[in-house]
Image (cartoon, grey):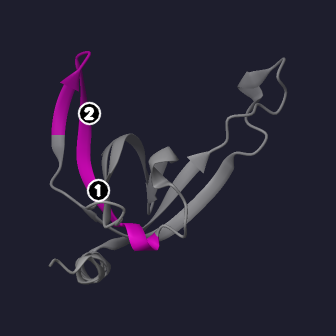
Amino acid sequence: MVNYASMVALSKRLIDANGRTVTLIHQGQTPLDSAKPWRGLDTYHRARVSGPAVFSKSESTNIDNMKRERQSVLFAASNSNGEDLLEFDQIQDGGSVWKIESGELIGPANTEVIYKFEVSR
């Protein structure tokens, strides 16, 4: 029988040891003034979660004749502080902001092991 608890602990240990600290952000959706939504959002950040993440090798894609850098990011599910990280919009990595294009939660059955995000600048 597979020990999923050891799988979760191993993935967390490897990401913590090899990753760098980032902040995942879930942006607010309610405008400050509904008549003038361009003035910004009422609650800019609905939620923030910080923790180590591992970035993969950079790739460039050519969408609409513009080069965009894309990377994969692995984040340990045990560092999520109980938040559903699939609802989050961006990742702050030092001075860089990455837009989350897609995300998935990897793990067998109800066991949450790793979040995998595809991000671009």
- Looking at the image, which residue sits at the far front? 1
User: Bounds of the magenta span?
Assistant: 60-79
Q: Residue at x 19, y 57 (%)?
A: 56
Q: Amino acid at mark 2?
A: Arg
Q: Residue at x 73, y 36 (%)?
A: 41
Residue 99 pos. (x, y %): 42, 42
Q: Earlier in the sequence, mark 1 or mark 2?
A: 2
- Within the image, what quadrant is residue 101 found in? top left
Residue 121 pos. (x, y %): 36, 40
Q: Residue at x 40, y 43 (%)?
A: 100
State yes or no: discs 1 and 2 in contact (Cβ < 8 Å).
no
Tell which of 121 and 9 is nearer to you: 9
Q: Amino acid at mark 1?
A: Val
Could you tell whether 83 is left or right of 104 in the image?
Answer: right
Q: In which quadrant is the N terminus drawn?
A: bottom left
Q: Is residue 3 above or below residue 120?
A: below
What secondary structure is found at the residue carrying circle 2? Answer: strand
Q: Is residue 26 above or below residue 79?
A: above
Task: Name the residue carrying label 1.
Answer: 73
The local crowd at label 2, few if under 14, some if 14 to 19, many if 20 or more residues have their Cα within 10 Å, is some
Residue 111 pos. (x, y %): 34, 66
Could you tell whether 81 is left or right of 41 in the image?
Answer: left
Residue 38 pos. (x, y %): 72, 24
What secondary structure is found at the residue carrying circle 1? Answer: strand
Q: Is residue 121 visible?
A: no
Residue 57 in the magenta stretch? The answer is no
Q: Is residue 35 visible?
A: yes
> Is most of the magenta stretch helix, strand or loop?
strand
Q: Residue at x 67, y 35 (%)?
A: 29
Residue 74 in the magenta stretch? The answer is yes
Could you tell whether 32 is left or right of 116 in the image?
Answer: right
Task: Name the residue carrying label 2.
Answer: 68
